[in-house]
Image (cartoon, coloured by chain):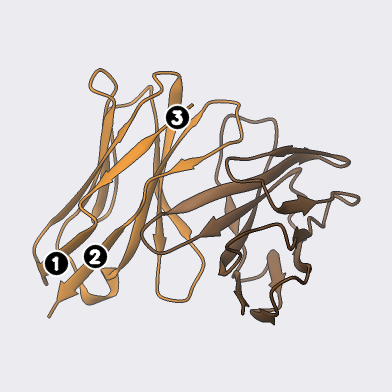
Amino acid sequence: DGGITQSPKYLFRKEGQNVTLSCEQNLNHDAMYWYRQDPGQGLRLIYYSQIVNDFQKGDIAEGYSVSREKKESFPLTVTSAQKNPTAFYLCASSIEGNPAGEQYFGPGTRLTVT
Amino acid sequence: GENVEQHPSTLSVQEGDSAVIKCTYSDSASNYFPWYKQELGKRPQLIIDIRSNVGEKKDQRIAVTLNKTAKHFSLHITETQPEDSAVYFCAARQEYGNKLVFGAGTILRVKS
């Protein structure tokens, strides 16, 4: 299960607090992604980054922010503006530039906000 | 943008039977279609994928078929086993693009 890691596995926060989820990969992949998984809704794209110092909004970016200062790291901040932040968050990475290829997923972080 | 619909949402089969999960997509420019398997509490993992220049691809008990005209693709699992029980997701993406659009998932239960 090496290659792409997320920490922590479980995270609990009080409403109104910002929280940052970690995602690190040692696969030398250029592209990284953040998905949110809710029951019955599949995986929805929050943000993605194709190269260091660049990222684009996905389908549900409101209330989230990211940075991509290093190729290996793509942290996600869930801000207090996110109305329903409790969910399972998955990070993924893939090789950039070839024809569309496999995305490799991290083990996920389950965030609970009360 | 792309929209992917997946059916059924749940599927129960007897061990040894076949299982079929179907997906439709809306964007005719999409030409890469992966299938992911997610076991309970674990990360999604790619089990098979197909590109639009082929109509079918097989890997042991798993096969995927693609109908570009109708814009639908299907996952076929033969001789199902209890370890096949999981959530399966289909997805679609334009070639050279990076955004995967996922279906809502199918919970497959294989009864022994």
Q: In the displayed structure, would residue B29 be above or below residue B101? A: above
Is B45 displayed left or right of A15 in the figure? left
The N terminus of chain A lies in which quarter of the figure? bottom right
Amino acid type shown at disc 3: Glu
The x, y position of residue A49, in whole percent, is 74, 42
Residue occupied by mark 2:
B108
Task: Say which chain is brown.
Answer: A
* Residue type (three-letter) at the residue carrying disc 1: Ser
Q: What residue type is labelled 2?
A: Leu
Query: Does dot 3 land on a helix, a strand or a loop?
Result: loop
Which badge, 3 or 1, is on the more N-terminal residue? 3
The residue carrying pointer 1 sits among few (fewer than 14), some (14 to 19) or many (20 or more) residues within 10 Å by Cα, namely few
Q: Distance between the Cα atoms at labels 3 and 1?
A: 29 Å
Q: Are marks 3 and 1 in contact (CB under 8 Å)?
A: no
Label 1 chain ID: B
Q: Say the numbered circle drawn on residue B12.
A: 1
Which circle marks residue A28 in the picture? none
Which chain contains the residue that carries disc 2? B
Residue B69 in the image, given as x and y percentages of width and height = 25, 17
**Are the numbered discs 2 and 1 placed on the same chain, yes or no?**
yes
Which chain is assigned orange? B
What residue lies at 69% left-to-right and 39% top-to-bottom? Answer: A57
Q: Do the CB atoms of the residues marked 2 and 1 lie less than 8 Å apart?
A: yes
| Front residue (pair A107, A113) | A113
Of circles 3 and 2, which is in front? 3
Give the letter of the chain under mark 3: B
Corner quadrant of residue B25: top left
Q: In the rendered view, tell whether residue B75 sits above or below residue A25.
A: above
Q: Which of marks 2 and 1 is nearer the N terminus?
A: 1
> Would you name the residue on which mark 3 appears?
B2
Q: Which mark is nearer the camera, 3 or 1?
A: 3
